[in-house]
Image: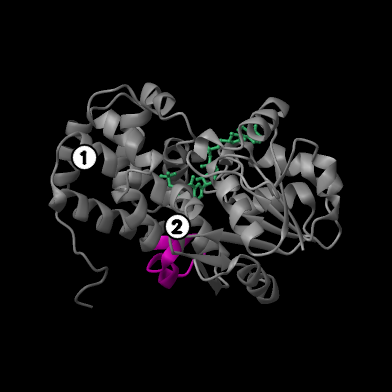
Amino acid sequence: MNISVLGSGGWGTALSLLLLENGHKVRLWSAFPEEEERLRSSGENPLLSGVPLSKDLEITSDITEISDSAVVVFAAPSFAVRQTAKKAAPHLAPDAVLVSVSKGIEKGSMLRLSQVIAQETGEGHPMVALSGPSHAEEVGRGVPTGCVAASVDRKAAEFVQDVFMCPRFRVYASPDIVGVELGAALKNVIALCSGVCDGMNCGDNTKAMLMTRGLAEIARLGAAMGGRRETFAGLAGVGDLIVTCTSMHSRNRRAGILIGQGVEPAEAVRRIGAVVEGYFAAEVAKSLSERYNVEMPISLGAYRVLYQGSRPETVLQELMTRSRKHEIEDSWT
Ligand SMILES: NC(=O)c1ccc[n+]([C@@H]2O[C@H](COP(=O)([O-])OP(=O)(O)OC[C@H]3O[C@@H](n4cnc5c(N)ncnc54)[C@H](O)[C@@H]3O)[C@@H](O)[C@H]2O)c1
Ligand SMILES: O=P(O)(O)OC[C@H](O)CO
């Protein structure tokens, strides 16, 4: 079938190649004609280096070409999802299935990215979020990977499962699009913190504590926002948290390492040279924790380091000396 992938970063490119391999006719759209030209002439995406672009991959910067696509995949960084959806909206086939693979929450509106896309494209299209532990660098070179296709529409979730699934890319279906999208967006903040810990030379104990308590606060907010707790124990929750907190592919973790080594946060993000979603997500996590009255001490600590000039050492010390807590809520009731 005809599929368009909107956003020619590392992830849009890796998924385009996977979909081509699955026998689809794939068009990769870039927002920038000069980027389109560079991809075509070099035969490689610098954001996914070492993975040659197949000759069968169509590359374009003309959004009108998406009108023949049965599936449209949104793979832009979160800050560009709304403008990408706005550009795409007039050209979508009426029955096109939309797939959001970006990981973030829109600043300001605090909407999940599938909600942003639905606002811009009209509510009529089946909408699926695809997420999980899936670094583009590894999907690009065929490493076995597992993800979740989530939608309130079972038919759409299972359809997208079939479109993406192959022996090297296993996809589970889920009805919990809220939990899947929140897990994807919020783990980026914890991944950044994990890098900060590494940059400060904390040990494995610290990182294990960070990941576990980070997941606890993600799940707490996720449940308050309507996500299902089981989702945070799945691929889009703990699965993605593990991969981003431990991998050198993670842009969030690498930015965090620089910050932990003393580099100023905005400069650390600039040096990564690709989108660092956790930088934006920390701001949204703070607002959401206030709106839903959910304690998120680690994400709040990240916010203070990233935006208020707090030192990571100070924040770590404060987190370690918070008043004593029970691990399980209502432990002895
Ligand atoms: N890279 C991964 O391993 C990976 C895996 C899963 C999900 N994701 C998510 O996918 C999204 C994209 O990540 P990525 O790694 O491909 O990013 P990237 O940094 O590799 O991509 C940058 C690209 O974004 C596009 N872009 C920039 N500004 C744009 C605009 N205004 N309009 C449209 N496109 C614009 C450009 O094509 C640019 O090359 C993020 O939300 C990320 O969290 C990434
Ligand atoms: O490079 P990161 O940290 O943005 O992680 C990318 C993906 O979310 C991994 O699943």
Residue 124: image quadrant is bottom right
Task: Farthest residue to the bottom: give it.
Answer: 333
Instruction: Tell which circle, 2 or 1, labels the residue nearer the N-terminal end.
Output: 2
- For numbered disc 2, what is the local secondary structure? helix
Q: Is residue 201 visible?
A: yes
Q: Is mark 1 within 8 Å of ligand 2?
A: no
Disc 2 crowd rating (10 Å Cα; few below 14, some 14-19, many 20+) is many
Task: Farthest residue to the front: give it.
Answer: 55
Q: Is mark 2 within 8 Å of ligand 2?
A: no
| 27 is higher (above) or lower (below) than 227 | above
- For numbered disc 1, what is the local secondary structure? helix
Q: Is residue 205 left or right of residue 118?
A: left
Q: Which mark is residue 8?
A: none
Marks 2 and 1 in Cβ contact (< 8 Å) = no
Give coordinates of residue 103: x percent, y percent: 52, 49
Q: Which mark is residue 183?
A: 2
Q: Which mark is residue 198?
A: 1
Kind of residue sitting beneath label 1: Asp
Quadrant hosting ligand 1: top right
Kind of residue sitting beneath label 2: Gly
| Residue range (magenta) | 224-237
Q: Is 20 or 169 nearer to us in this picture?
A: 20
Q: Is residue 206 left or right of residue 299?
A: left
Q: Is residue 184 left or right of residue 53?
A: left
Q: Name the residue located 60 percent from the left edge and 53 percent from the top edge.
A: 17
Residue 270: image quadrant is top left
Q: Is residue 323 visible?
A: no
